[in-house]
Image (cartoon, rainbow, N blue to C red):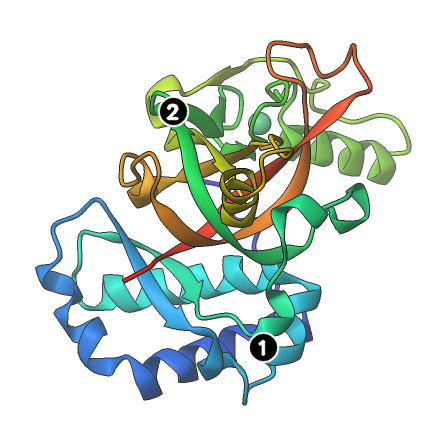
Amino acid sequence: MSTIHTTEPDPESQLILHTWRKLFENNYGSELDRSSLYEEEVFGFEVRWELLKNTPLHSIFPNNPKKALELGNQVIREQFQNRNSITRPVIRIVGFDQEFSYYLEDVRTRDRGRLLSFQVTVTNLDTPMGWLKKSKYICHDCGVTWSVNQSLARERKRSTICLDCEREYIKQMKESKGKAKIPPPTHNITMLVEENVYEDIQYIEITCPSMISKVLEQEDSNQIYSYLAVVDDEYVGSLSINQEVTINAWVELDHLPNRDFAMDTRRVFIFKVHSIESKN
Ligand SMILES: [Zn+2]
């Protein structure tokens, strides 16, 4: 038995879902039909930014890229499943306009949350690792299961009570004016460890190619900053040191490495990579 907490999507979500469906059907029909042949566990499905330009996504995406992508990924997963593909697709938007283009060295805290495009040189690669993206729980009183979405490099969020049992108890208390015939909700829940969802990630260090050329050209300049970025899924293990690529990434702030984020107010930028474009 699994819980159904679905509500009708809001009008903007419906518009986003409809737009993605049309975009895939009109432009990527043959690629989608090939999806049953893909054997990768995760398949990065590249979508050109210009295709979004004549659709409502052109204005929705820059203001709410996370929502637009989450719903888009839902649509493309449906499209793959309809074609009996075993692969999990993820949308990777590439070819962003000049207006998204930015220099790493110009990034400041005001840019937090923006999705921007950077020319970068990879300077270091960390060991690939996994993180707990979603944990799953079961209530032993009513049998319902639910998921808790986690955040990267933050304390794990945990459930302590079954919300269905709690809701039912409150409802019965109200209806019976405080004389519910069922006991109050217990804490009889456990995590379904084997159903937890993990994601592959890799921390990388990047710098601006322009900083490197400045140091090479000017004797008095020796400043090369490197920045922390994190890639996921099919990008893990795909980059090499000194490689020059364009990354389209969210600017976020993270605690200093090796420090407890709750104990220290200083933050470093971390670039959460949405898509990578190789230079040919
Ligand atoms: Zn329950």
- Viewer-proximal residue among 154 and 122: 122
Q: In x, y percent, where is residue 143?
A: 47, 28
- Label 2 neighbourhood size at 10 Å, few (<14), some (14-19), many (20+)? few
Residue 149 x %, y %: 56, 35
Of the residues under marks 1 and 2, which one precedes in the sequence? 1
Image side of residue 140 versus residue 127, left or right: right
Give the quarter the ligand 1 occupies.
Answer: top right
Left or right of residue 271: residue 31: left
Packing grade of label 1 (10 A; few <14, some 14-19, many >=20) is: many
Q: Amino acid at mark 1?
A: Leu
Q: Residue at x 40, y 60 (%)?
A: 92
> Residue 34, position in %: x, y?
13, 70
Looking at the image, the residue that sits furthest to the left is: 37
Between the C-alphas of marks 1 and 2, the distance is 32 Å
From the viewer's perspective, is residue 275 above or below residue 257?
below
Q: Relative to 4, is 194 on the left or the right?
A: left
